[in-house]
Amino acid sequence: MGVSTSPPQLLLLLLLLSTLLVPCAPSVVEEHHLSAMHGSLRSSGYPKPYPNEAQQTWRISVPSGYRVRLHFTFFDVETSFGCEYDYIKVEVTNEILGQFCGRQNGNTAPKAEPMVTPGNVVDITFVSDFSNDERYTGFEVYFTAVDIDECEEYARVDELACDHNCFNYPGGYQCSCQYGYVLADDNRSCTVECSNHVFTERQGELSSPDFPRPYPRALQCKFTLRLEEGFVFSLAFQEPFDVETHNEIDTCPYDSLTIRSGGEEWGPLCGTTLPDPIETRGFEVEVVFRSDTSGQNKGWNLHYTAKSLPCSHVTAPVHGSIEPVQATYSFKDRVVFSCDIGYRLIQQEDGKEVPATLQVECQKDGTWSREPPTCRIVDCGKPAQPNKGFCDSPDVTTYKSETDCGCIDAYHFTTEMNGVFTCNESGHWTDPRSGEKVPKCEPVCGEPKHVIMELLRIVGGRSARSGNFPWQVLVKFMSGRMLGGGGALLGDRWVLTAAHVVADYAANETTVILGSMKRVSLKDNPLGSTQQYTVDKIISHPGYDPLSTGYDNDIALIRLAGDAVTMTDSVRPICLPTVEGGRVNPKLSPNDVAFVSGWGRTAGTLGAMLADTLQYVDLPVVPQAECERANAGKWIAELNANSTVTENMFCAGYSEGGKDSCQGDSGGPIVVVQDNKWFTVGVVSWGMGCAKPGFYGVYTRVDKYLDWLRDEMEKNAVKSDY
């Protein structure tokens, strides 16, 4: 009997079937995005049972360089075969790390040890079905960002590992290189800077960096051998040769060595077979070496040598030498020619002398840049005749020849020498001891032609003969002043006198007469015995101030204008004292006999006339204490002041009077003789009258002014005199 169904019952049945066949949407849907260094997540309603038909998704993100560590602290999810009802799924970039269900510590539940993800982003999904016969509490999980040690982890991955040094830091790592290397663009490979290296030596060697140790990765090396046009290179590879290659491809796809020169190319070269020697046709060679980011190969090494056309053989010239001495000479080789001492290089092309050395160079066409020179002996030529002197004219004037030189009468050499001059290697006649090139003659000082025989006095004395006092000069002034003054010739340009004699006169008002015996009647002098000079400079001592210091520093110099004085029997200079080891020579001592000359008054009485003929007298030097006592507190009418004897003065004369210098003698010299040589020790300065008993003539002490005199004469020297 069939079963009949009424329409209402059929409709109810259809509704029930549709409910069973169409799945229901989850009752709980949640999506969470967590970006933190740590945190936690749990099932919906935890710790109460989770609802049916739930779907929760969490995306956990931690910074790059970190990973996510998951620690399930509680787990209670419905158990099913393959965890297909309720489950938790953990995945990274569509890779499922695990799908879990069951109770904690069960076979399908997460393990007790924390789980660490391989990346810094992880997705966790929780799903529950529509019915559970039991109550399940769900789960709770804590997550933490964990720094990874890339240095250790990547060490075994060739594409990620650092070549040299690796430094880990939170969230990442950094590679660095040893000294001499640089980090490549991939920030992990270490290479060397080997681009645009230029070598200009004619021989040497090239190699891959660190040869024979493995060469660095990521190399882009370029070496250039460059010489001047005319050279070519020979290249010879040395064992071992080891450049990374491919077993099946012979075009060197990994690492390669390529050589280019003169339009030719060799390579790319790789493998372990030593390449054949290379002979280039150019003077420039380019060597290019490249390596990729992997491999451990030793590299390569080559020797290079430049070759060129040889030049003709050269030898040292007679009396000369060359440097360097070689069996052969090639392009760019240089040879330096030089001559022995006393010889000069002579150019073959024009016969001109070369100062010291001559360098010739082998050119690219095998010829020398110039002809080899010869050596010719130095010739000094005829010796120059010195002023106031002479030199013989030898027949031979070449190197090491000699000539005798000397000075005319009344002159001698300025330095001690024997008068023999030698032709030296520089082409000059020189004195071997002093090195002077031209002998210089200067006047002999303190050696009169006619030495006085008597010891007489000016006041009460007698006239001098021509040549007795050849240094004596007469100082006259254009004003016609009758007295004038005296002075002493120093050398051939200067006159020593007293400052008070020239104080009121300019240089162009002053005339100096040398060699004269007469004061007024100059025409009565022996023919040719006198010389008259104008004056271009008067230098008084800066310390001379008669209004404040009386006659202290009463000393001056007169420079003669025109040509230097010519020495004769009647004109010769006086010597200045010398200083040796701090001692003055001659030393002025009491009772030394000194001589004064001049045209002063010949009597100490009022109205006495000036002498027309040069007079002289000998006077003893007075002890300094007696000199100061005799003049202490005396009134000097000319200065309108009391007299004072200073350490720059000394006295000479006789206590009984009768013999003295007098007016008109001022500025003249007081001299002494030692070992037949005459020295001026003082300058006639002042006195209390003339030849009075108990009074002495006072003189400026020359040895106190030696430095000043020499400095002034040197500073104001006339250049034409040298």
Image: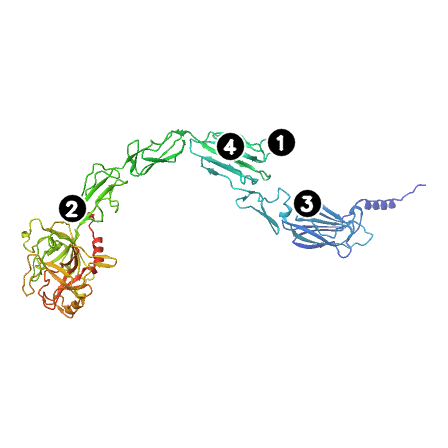
Badge 1 or badge 2: first in the primary sequence: 1
- Residue at 81% of width from left, 46% of height from top? 19
Residue placed under numbered mark 1 in the picture: 248
Q: Secondary structure at mark 1?
A: loop
Q: Which mark is residue 501?
A: none
Q: Is residue 664 above or below residue 368?
A: below
Which comes sooner in the sequence, label 4 or label 3? Answer: 3
Look at mark 2 in the image and give the residue it sits on.
408
Q: Which sits earlier in the primary sequence, circle 4 or circle 1?
A: 4
Q: Amino acid at mark 1?
A: Glu
Circle number at residue 93: 3
Q: In which quadrant of the rendered view does residue 495 lie?
A: bottom left
In the rendered image, the vertical position of residue 420 relative to residue 497, given as above or below: above
What is the crowding at mark 2: few (fewer than 14 residues within 10 Å), some, or many (at least 20)? Answer: some
Query: What x and y, as percent, mark residue 401?
Result: 24, 39
Q: Which of the two residues, 153 or 707, is positioned nearer the viewer here?
A: 707
x 68%, y 45%: residue: 93
Alpha-carbon distance for marks 3 and 1?
37 Å
Vertical placement of 237 versus 517: above or below? Answer: above
Circle 4 residue: 236
Element assignment for label 2? loop
Q: Amino acid at mark 4?
A: Ala
